[in-house]
Image: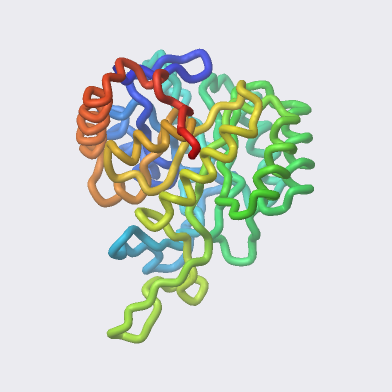
Amino acid sequence: MLTTDFLDYRFNNPLMNASGVYCTTTTELDELHDSSAGTLITKSATIHPRSGNSEPRYVDVPLGSINSMGLPNNGLDYYLDYALAYQENNQRPLFFSVAGMSAKEIIQILRKIESSSFNGIVELNLSCPNVPGKPQIAYDFPLTQQLLTEVFHFFTKPIGIKLPPFFDIAHFDQMAEILNQFPLAYVNSINSIGNGLYIDSEKESVVIKPKDGFGGIGGEYIKPTALANVRAFYTRLNPQIKIIGTGGIYSGQDVFEHLLCGAQLVQIGTALHTEGPKIFDRLINELTTIMDSKGYQTIDEFRGKLKSL
């Protein structure tokens, strides 16, 4: 019932983790593989290992989370070694997330993956809002076009991009016009809403240390924005560019809404951090119950069919 086709692959269901959550170590990645998730994605890898921002840098708050992690990860070679070993034992691919402190570093990373025997799917993170002094590439439209032009001069493997949220119809139009020029496998929307501020009123203090308390907002707070971005890009991008929906997914109902907006796969972030990999069993059961109640036998019967008034 929940079988999902994505590119040339078939997954048991459309659920996976969001990069950055439960995927930093090989132990966590193995736990995801052993869970009920349809597939999994690695932590965004930079060319060298990064320790990330100072603690505390992640805090659960009443309707979600705030974080300023700073891209802590074990480096490209660590995740590439894992990915190459993974594909020897699994027919279904994993998703390999990469990020860079600059366009030059991104190109360096992708050239190494291109020259490797990795045969999975790459996710290029253009939307990390929590590295001090480093703007999000995806908010610079000319730079995004320039970078993707360079990438597709040499990169031949399936690749999608992770986008930050956009808030203006004109920006949806402009970004879609850029992305439609390239043979992208997919667009993942959204990353956290950047530079929110959460206050502990008892202590009269911010709750995370980096950036004077400014951090990315995730969880229930961001679901309406995530759904809007999924819908906006689903209706604007070329049909061959698939959509992965991320943001505010806690229940089967939330999964259903992302799929209804046009998502092919959905990624779980804050809720996975809170509940652990067992969340996938619950989400599968809840989504199946909703589909049964509506008489749907497959996801494709309702995917992307959101009605307007």
Task: Measuring from the top left, give residue 123's x and y in whole percent.
Answer: 55, 35
- In this view, the residue farthest toward the front is 309
- Residue sitting at x 31%, y 33%: 32
Q: With respect to residue 107, does 297 lie above or below?
A: above
- Residue sitting at x 50%, y 43%: 44
Quick check: 13 left or right of 98?
left
Quick check: 105 left or right of 146?
left
- Residue sitting at x 71%, y 31%: 180
Q: Residue 176, can we see it? A: yes
In front of the other: 155 or 215: 215
Quick check: 195 left or right of 144?
left
Task: Measuring from the top left, give residue 91's x and y in whole percent.
Answer: 41, 13
Q: Quadrant of residue 59?
A: bottom left
Q: With respect to residue 20, does 55 lie above or below?
A: below
Q: Residue 35, can we see it? A: no
Task: Measuring from the top left, give residue 267's x and y in whole percent.
Answer: 40, 38
In front of the other: 156 or 76: 156
In front of the other: 309 or 265: 309
- Residue sitting at x 59%, y 37%: 233
Q: Quadrant of the N terminus?
A: top left
Task: Measuring from the top left, give residue 198's x and y in whole percent.
Answer: 40, 72
Task: Name the colouring of the figure.
Answer: rainbow
